Amino acid sequence: GWSVQNFWGGIALLAPPLDPPLTVLLVAATISTAATNERGSPSLITEEKVNDTLVRSVYLQVLRGRDGRDGVPGRDGVKGERGDKGEKGEKGDTGARGDTGPKSGGVVYTRWGRKSCPTGAQLLYEGIAGGSHYTHSGGGANYVCLPKVPQYMSTHIPSHYSYMYGSEYQEVNGIFPGKHDHNVPCAVCYTTTKSVKLMIPARTSCPSSWTREYKGYLMAEYSTHARNAVYECFDEAPESIAGSHTNVDGALFYFVRTTCTGLPCPPYYVNRPITCVVCTK
Ligand SMILES: [Ca+2]
């Protein structure tokens, strides 16, 4: 069997006796829901006379079919448009602290003429400035900061060799009072929070955002001595190694005077001791 819902629509057609042809005057509908009519007729027509007017009533039975559950599924629909962007979510929780990364940076420099380091720098060791003899044309060109207590490995005496001497401030009374012939200390300093260093000759200030570790005077060997040496930057307030005032020479430190040969004068001036500054960042 099959179930139908019958809609009975009554359409009253009024047929007057004369032409013009039938005119629909009234549509009345009665709806009968959920009625069952197995054999139902598609329509039912009745006629009756009302006031000499032929009234023909046509009842149409509208059969409603069952649902399409047995049908074949349709094809995919057209893809819809992209939706609007959603609102920003709330900030998430702070993540766990990561592992400590490898250490990098740090600067080591020698503060010539001093036994201690500037504030913020760690003293690695206090030392004695040394180098080759001022009368020797060979030897090492640089000054070194020798530790106060050495460590040896061999007792063999080299048959061919270079020499290491202590050092003295030489002819410096005008600028380093009382330091002539005194032996020179040095301090090797370590700044953990810096990553680069810079020594600027002829300046006493550092570039902006750099830290001045110390300032002072540039020193090197005497101009006509057999030995030439690298320039080093000495602290402006030098110290002496205790009990070292005797003149024994060895490696020597002299101030450096500017010339106006190849240098712009001014701003350079002839015969002035050249300054220096050590900067870190
Ligand atoms: Ca001397």
Image (cartoon, rainbow, N blue to C red):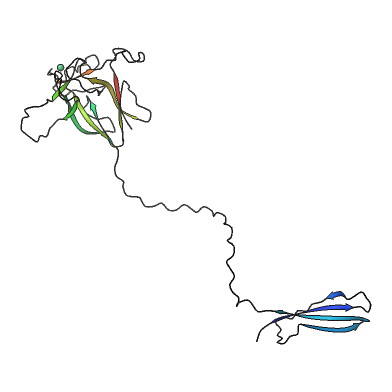
Q: Quadrant of ligand 1?
A: top left
> Whole-percent x and y of residue 169?
19, 19
> Whole-percent x and y of residue 276?
29, 22
Of residue 245 and residue 128, the one placed in the foreground of this image is: 128
**Residue at 88% across, 78% down:** 14
Of residue 149 and residue 218, the one placed in the foreground of this image is: 218
Answer left or right for 261 relative to 224. right
Residue 115 visible in the snapshot: no
Asked where in the image residue 192 lies, by quadrant, the reply is top left
> Whole-percent x and y of residue 251?
16, 21
Q: Is residue 139 above or below residue 70?
A: above
Residue 215 visible in the snapshot: yes
**In the picture, which quadrant includes the N terminus?**
bottom right
Answer left or right for 104 relative to 54. left
Q: Is residue 33 above or below residue 205?
A: below
Of residue 20 and residue 110, the one placed in the foreground of this image is: 20
In this figure, what is the number of numbered marks?
Answer: 0
Q: Is residue 150 above or below residue 246?
A: below
**In the picture, which quadrant includes the C terminus?**
top left
Asked where in the image residue 219 lies, by quadrant, the reply is top left
**Residue at 84% across, 78% down:** 12
Of residue 264 and residue 107, the one placed in the foreground of this image is: 264
**Residue at 85% across, 75% down:** 26
Answer left or right for 15 relative to 249. right
> Whole-percent x and y of residue 68?
63, 76
